[in-house]
Image (tube, rainbow, N blue to C red):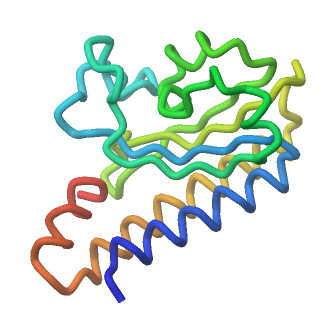
């Protein structure tokens, strides 16, 4: 099976798991386009180029279909960037930086919803753990990619 398809499937499962555990209608896992890395990795917004509205190179979304139907104005691509997510008129938005094996920020795992609330410490731990698992999935796929094209594409996110 193609490693990219397997990685996407694994990330979709993680996003769905996080949505259920966090009781939020939306969870996104965003991996940034390496060419839009102008915001500084320490700020947690690497890849959030203000010039590029489509900053995500890859996006996995778990979203409640009823919620999505009631919120057609929400642009899921923007949830990967904390600065732009704030423009989406959400009650809840929380994200964690997705890091590669060297510690550089290569994306985010974010949750969102209507209810204005803070995540509890246990919910923040869930978000941290899901983010760590997503990082591990990406790194493992890059390490085991068999064909050169897949390996090069995945190494951008894990090297």
**Which residue is painted at 57% across and 64% down in the image?**
133
The percent position of residue 10, horizontal first and vertical second, equals 54, 71
Q: Which residue sits at x=50%, y=14%?
A: 83
Q: Which image quarter: residue 132?
A: bottom right
Q: Nearer the viewer, residue 156 or 1?
A: 1
Q: Position of residue 121 (x, y in %)?
A: 85, 39
Horizontal arrangement in the rendering, residue 88 relative to residue 144 (left or right): right
Name the one closer to the observer, 158 or 154: 154
- Note whether 28 is above or below 149 in the view shown: above
> Residue at (24%, 20%) from the top-left corner?
38
Q: Is residue 44 above or below residue 58?
A: above
Q: Which of the 4 image quarters holds residue 74?
A: top right
Image side of residue 84 versus residue 148, left or right: right
Q: Is residue 52 above or below residue 29?
A: above
The C terminus sits in image quarter: bottom left
**Closer to us: 124 or 60:** 60
Q: Pinpoint residue 24: horizontal percent, then vertical percent.
A: 82, 41
């Amino acid at each position: 099976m193609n490693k990219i398809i397997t990685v996407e499937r694994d990330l979709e499962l993680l996003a769905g798991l996080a949505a259920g555990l966090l009781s939020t209608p939306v969870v996104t896992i965003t991996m940034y386009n390496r060419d839009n890395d102008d915001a500084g990795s320490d700020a947690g917004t690497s890849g959030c180029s203000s010039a590029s509205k489509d900053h995500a190179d890859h996006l996995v979304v778990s979203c409640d279909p009823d919620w999505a139907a009631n919120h057609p104005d929400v642009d899921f691509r923007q949830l990967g960037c904390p600065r732009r997510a704030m423009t989406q008129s959400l009650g809840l938005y929380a994200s964690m930086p997705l890091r590669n094996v060297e510690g550089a920020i290569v994306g985010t795992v974010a949750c969102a919803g209507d209810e204005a609330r803070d995540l509890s410490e246990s919910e923040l731990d869930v978000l941290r753990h899901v983010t760590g698992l997503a990082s591990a999935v990406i790194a493992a796929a890059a390490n085991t990619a068999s064909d050169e094209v897949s390996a090069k594409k995945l190494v951008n996110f894990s090297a």
